[in-house]
Every structure is written in C-alpha cells, then in structure tokens.
C-alpha cells in the first residue's frame, strides 16, 4: 500500500512538472512574437542599421529586408506624409522611422486601436541618428501615434539641444 501511494505521488509530481513546463513554453511564445520586429530599409542606409542595433539592444529580435521601404510603407497603410528611411512592423503595428524602443514598448503595452507610430523625416538625436557623425546635435522631434484613418497625435515629444 505504501509503495502504491509513493508511486502515485511520484506520478502526480511528474505530471505537474510537465504541465508547468508546457504552460511556461506556451506563455512565453506570444511575448517572443510581439518582440519581433520586421524592418524594410535600403541596403546601404547606415542610420537604419544603427536603429536596428538600437532595437536589438532594447530586447527586440529583428529581421531585415534590404529592399527599400516605400512599397512596404504603402502596403502597410502608413501615409507618405509620415515617411522616413525605414518602415517596420511589430506586434501588429506599423513603425515608421527612427522611433525609440521605449515608445514602441509603451505602444505594445498600452495596445491602442491605431495603425502605429511614426517619427517623420530623420531627426538628429533620435535612435540611429545619434552617432558620432552627428557631433552630439539633437533636434526637437515628435513621435506620432498614427490612427488607421491617417490622422495623428503626439505620442511623445523630445527636446533637443539645437547645436
């Protein structure tokens, strides 16, 4: 009787361990998918490569398509007025330009009903536009929350040093 109880307890413990491992695996899969960024950029664009490195340093996995971004920007529905040198997709959102990883993380946490974020043009001081070549210059810029109808509002404002 005693060995039967021991065998039953061991079996229950084994099933519990396996169930726990499976649930951890399943729970972690969506987080990995949400943190994966797909980027479209020109193969020769150095600042885009710097932005990709910024994203990796901030916990994102990144796949890059060196095919340019104009066609993909249009396909994903990001209006041309928000254009920059690269376009990305993460967690079902479109990201245009040198948008900081912190703003993207906030977007993925808040999950607004929107198209995505845009940092139009290529503002100095934004991620990828902040290397030694820019000599510490930083411009004011806004990260915009772009709605599905093409309207936008300021999501985050950054102040530069205007050097």
Image (cartoon, rainbow, N blue to C red):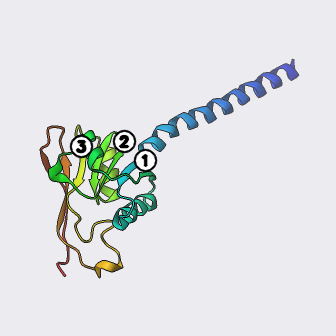
At a point 35% along the width and 75% down the height, the residue shown is 131
89 relative to 158 in the view: left or right: right
Image coordinates of residue 80 in percent, x first then y, are 17, 49
- Name the residue rendered at 18%, 53% in the picture: 82
Q: How far apart are the alpha carbons under marks 1 and 3?
A: 23 Å
- Residue 28 lies, with reference to residue 53, above or below; the image says above
Q: Residue at label 3?
A: 74
The circle on residue 157 is: none
Q: Which residue is labeled 1 in the image?
A: 35
Question: Residue 57 at x, y = what percent?
Answer: 45, 62
Instruction: Look at the image and tell me in which quarter the C terminus lies.
Output: bottom left
Which numbered mark, 3 or 2, is in the foreground of this view? 3
Residue 26 appears in which quarter of the rendering?
top right
Label 3 crowd bin: few (<14), some (14–19), many (20+), radius 10 Å: few
State if disc 3 and disc 1 touch (CB < 8 Å). Answer: no
Q: Point out which mark residue 91 bears.
A: 2
């Amino acid at each position: 009787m005693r060995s039967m109880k021991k065998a039953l307890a061991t079996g229950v413990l084994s099933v519990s361990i396996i169930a726990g491992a499976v649930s951890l695996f399943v729970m972690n899969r969506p987080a990995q998918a949400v943190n994966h960024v797909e980027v479209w950029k020109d193969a020769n664009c150095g600042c885009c490569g710097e932005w990709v490195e910024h994203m990796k340093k901030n916990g994102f996995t990144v796949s890059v398509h060196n095919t340019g971004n104009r066609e993909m920007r249009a396909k994903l529905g990001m209006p041309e007025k928000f254009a920059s040198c690269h376009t990305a997709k993460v967690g079902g959102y479109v990201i245009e330009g040198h948008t900081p990883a912190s703003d993207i993380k906030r977007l993925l946490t808040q999950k607004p009903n929107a198209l995505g974020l845009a940092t139009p043009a290529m503002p100095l001081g934004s991620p990828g536009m902040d290397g030694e070549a820019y000599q510490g210059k930083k411009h004011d810029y806004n990260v915009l929350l772009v709605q599905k109808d093409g309207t936008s509002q300021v999501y985050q404002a950054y102040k530069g040093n205007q050097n």
